[in-house]
Amino acid sequence: MRVRVPVAARIRFCSTGRTAARVFLLATFLVTAAQAQSLRKVIIDQDTSGPGGSNMMSVLALINSPETEVLGITVLTGDAWRDEEVLHALRLLEIIGRTDIPVVPGATYPLVSSREYIAKWETLYGKVAYQGAWNYAKGYAVHGPTEIPPMPEGAPTTKASSEDAPHFLVRLVRQYPHEITIYAAGPLTDLALAIAIDPHFAELTKELIVMGGSIRPQSNDPELTLNPRREFNFWMDPEASHVVLHARWPRLVLTTVDISVKTYMEKSLIKRIAKTAGPSAQYASSYAEPGYLWDELAAVAWLDPSLITVWEKLYVDVNVDHGAGYGDTLVWVPGQQPGLGEHLAEVQKDLDLERFYREFVLLLIGPTPSAIPGRSDNVASPGPNSTLSNTTIRVGGTPGEVRALPDHGPEACGSGESLQ
């Protein structure tokens, strides 16, 4: 027998059901929002050469951490040219399902130095073995900044942000004052440009984590033993490094070559990662390479500082005199520094190696956290100053032209002038 329910009762029932559903959805949203607020906000400023390698593994580790909210990845020339690195970053995010994270193009060239200038410098002071994009390419011939070699992991279908990295950095730090960690594991050009745009940029961050610098590494590698103070990230843009290391960061942490060479991506680690079937683990194991875990250590030690067993506070700078030591790391113990605005840095000296390996592997084989609802639209939308076309950056007392503004093509330059 079919029971007829009065219309009024049915309306009350449906209304009550819809209300309950709304309450449930609202509660879910509020819980998600509360969780998002408790996450550690970070912007990754990285030369995302790929696929795989130290750069991309560190990006994976930071995104996969359940403790982080990655607000964006700003990309600049370093180990490879910026434009191809942008595509590798976009493709990684597609593979792991995190296309909500904006990829923001940064600087193509350093503030002052250049491939051509270093070629002349080498005639006076000898060869620089590794120059990143300028003299090295993985699996193909060395090429120029606009050429895109074939991508083993496949080309991305998503697009990079139309905003440039320095303005993105300034905008986000203004949006979340004293909340954002900047993780910088490439040359420091983007950060120097952000400081030039907004003198308060550095002090409005929470902290700066840098993979850079070399003091006295213990290694059999002749490149390190013969030139112990030369480290690629600082060397690639010495003037930018100098600017950044003199800025007013609330906290500055350095992962140097000295501690990085105590780590190594052994084949046994790659095999452990390969046992997991998830997209992140499969990407990592497919493209991992034996080598020092430079950037990975900086990332994982930020997530878990207790991995570092010995610290030292030092004043740090970079040589910008264009002589034989151009781009070398300079350090002083407190009380011995020149007193010209150097920043006291927390320098990592030693680590619990086995714990680091264990935590690193767990980050790569673990599930990638889902996108935070409603976050990406707010983060990725450009502000009113979304181009550097009208910004002039000058570094006092250093020779050469400033050519560090991001290269978005002739239409970004206004009046047809070139930034190159």
Image (cartoon, rainbow, N blue to C red):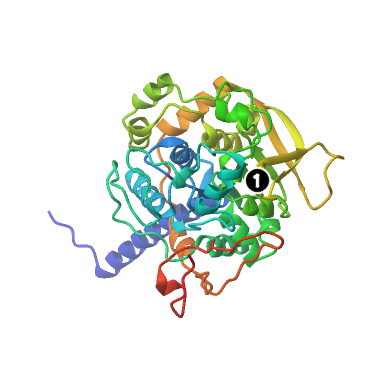
Q: Can you identify the residue that label 1 sits on?
A: 326
Viewer-closest of 115 and 297: 115
Whether residue 280 is visible here, answered yes or no, is yes
Pick out the residue farthest to the right. Answer: 335
Please provide percent x and percent y for residue 103: 43, 55
Residue 281: image x %, image y %? 37, 32
User: Is disc 1 placed on a helix, strand or loop?
Assistant: loop
Residue 184 seen: no
Q: What crowding class fits label 1: few (fewer than 14 Cα within 10 Å), some (14-19), or many (20 or more)?
A: many
Q: Nearer the viewer, residue 162 or 207?
A: 162
User: Is residue 366 positioned above or below 151 on the image?
Assistant: above
- Residue 57 falls left or right of residue 192: left
Q: Which residue is drawn at 65% across and 45% down?
A: 326
* Drawn side of residue 179 relative to residue 50, left or right: right
Q: What residue type is labelled 1?
A: Tyr
Is residue 19 depicted above or below 369 in this figure?
below
**Residue at 46% across / 78% down in the picture?**
414
Which one is nearer the viewer's eye here, 178 or 109? 109
